[in-house]
Image (spheres, helix red, strand yellow):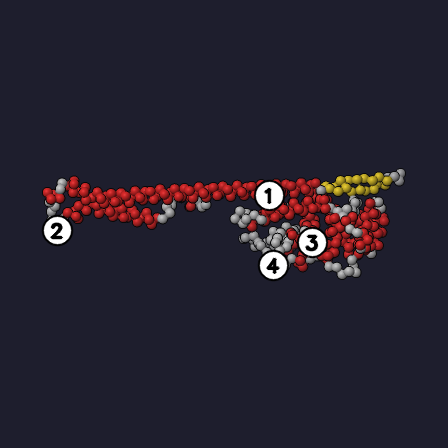
Amino acid sequence: MDKNDKKFKPSNDSIIWIFLILALIILIFSCVAPSFFVKVAKNQDLDFTKTGNIGDTIGGLMNPFVAIAGILVTFLAFYIQFSFNKFQINLFKHQWDDTQNKYEKDKFENQFYEMLRLHKENVNEMSLTTKKIIIHPNTNREIVENIVSGRRVFEYIINEFELILIVALASFKDENLDNQKIINEAYGVLFHGLHSFDINKHVFYQNLKKLQSNIYNLDYEEFNKSLTNITGVVTVSLAQRIDYSIFNGYSSQLAHYYRHLYQTVKFVVSQPEKKVNYEEKRNLLRILRAQLSNLEQALLFYNWYSGFGKQWQDNNNNFFTDYRMIHNVYNDLLHLDIKLEDIFDYNNNYKKEKNRENDSLFESQDW
């Protein structure tokens, strides 16, 4: 409610003026009424022996008009009081609505920040175990295990996904699969684990099984040989980054992570516009996105592009476009020569923040 609205204004000022002017006219007329009604003719003096005493004459003729004026003024007073009471009721209603809106908005923001806190906890709870072999001078081998937790886990997940993609490209090279189908096959193994598939169904799974066995036995030399035989390319740099159990699936961690992340975004986006406008939603989701590393956003893109998380961007939701949830992803971060401009129409009429000259879909557009 505006400050000007909080000032008392009767509901209809014209009625007040009409009654005031009418009462004033009647009151003025009451002053000349005795002379007007008792004169027999123009310039004829009053004969009070016929009209009665002066007080009786004047009082008898003026009182009705004064009474009428009094009635009008009394009605006017009641009308103003009625208008004021109505104003007070409306003011209270607006104040109540403002209080309720503020309460609902505070409640919404508190819930958002609680969901943000839970998201951070989900990230911190993610973990995996790495294993390295240390050869001592006396030729004894020592296996050293290390727990990796938190956001660093996504680096290992991305490395593993890159390995699966390399094997997928080599295994499906004669089947003319497009990039999206290959990513779907690779992400399926990353998410569910190799144990969820029939190994004999395709050479893709058989190749992955060889590599998995090599890593399980900590036989990195054989792993490099197997990977070279599968791809026809020496990829020692990738092999050096694989020092943990692979292809066991991350559904137990990623499912919970993505489910909560999706619900948090949906919770913000679904708020009524009169309660939380578009700019406010973008600001809150910008805070959420700031918690996601570039690798997390890249993996989120793969989650969607593979079809596993298709609800992130579909006919019902525009979380990637209108709300920029993968704003920090860029082409060089993705594999298979995927180009964001081939997937997203940069010239489409996506939602943009008001009074913002440049509100690009991806930050790489501004580089």
What amino acid does circle 3 point to? Gly
Marks 1 and 3, how far apart in space?
27 Å
Mark positioned earlier in the residue sequence (1 or 2): 2
Residue located at (67% from left, 58% from top)? 343
Amino acid at dot 2: Ala
**Residue pictured at 11% horizontal, 44% vertical:** 50
Element at label 4: loop
Q: CA distance from mark 2 to mark 3?
A: 106 Å
Q: Residue at x 56, y 52 (%)?
A: 353
Numbered mark located on residue 307 in the image: 3
- 4 or 1: tag closer to the N-terminus: 1
User: Which numbered disc, 4 or 2, marks the residue that appears first in the sequence?
Assistant: 2
- Residue 271 in the image: state x and y as whole percent: 56, 48
Q: Amino acid at mark 1?
A: Phe
- Label 4 to label 1, Cα distance in Å? 30 Å
Mark 4 and mark 3: Cα distance apart in space: 22 Å
Q: Are the residues tagged 4 and 2 within 8 Å (C-beta)? A: no
Q: CA distance from mark 4 to mark 2?
A: 91 Å
Cβ atoms under marks 4 and 3 closer than 8 Å: no
In the picture, measured across the screen, residue 233 lies left or right of residue 344, that is right
Image height of 3 relative to 201, above or below = above
Asked if residue 28 lies left or right of residue 146, the reply is: left
Per the rendering, the mark at residue 112 is 1
For the residue labelled by badge 2, is the local secondary structure a helix, a strand or a loop? loop
Disc 4 or disc 2, which is closer to the eye? 2
In primary-sequence order, the first of circles 1 and 3 is 1
> Residue beneath label 4, please?
348
Residue type, numbered disc 4: Asn
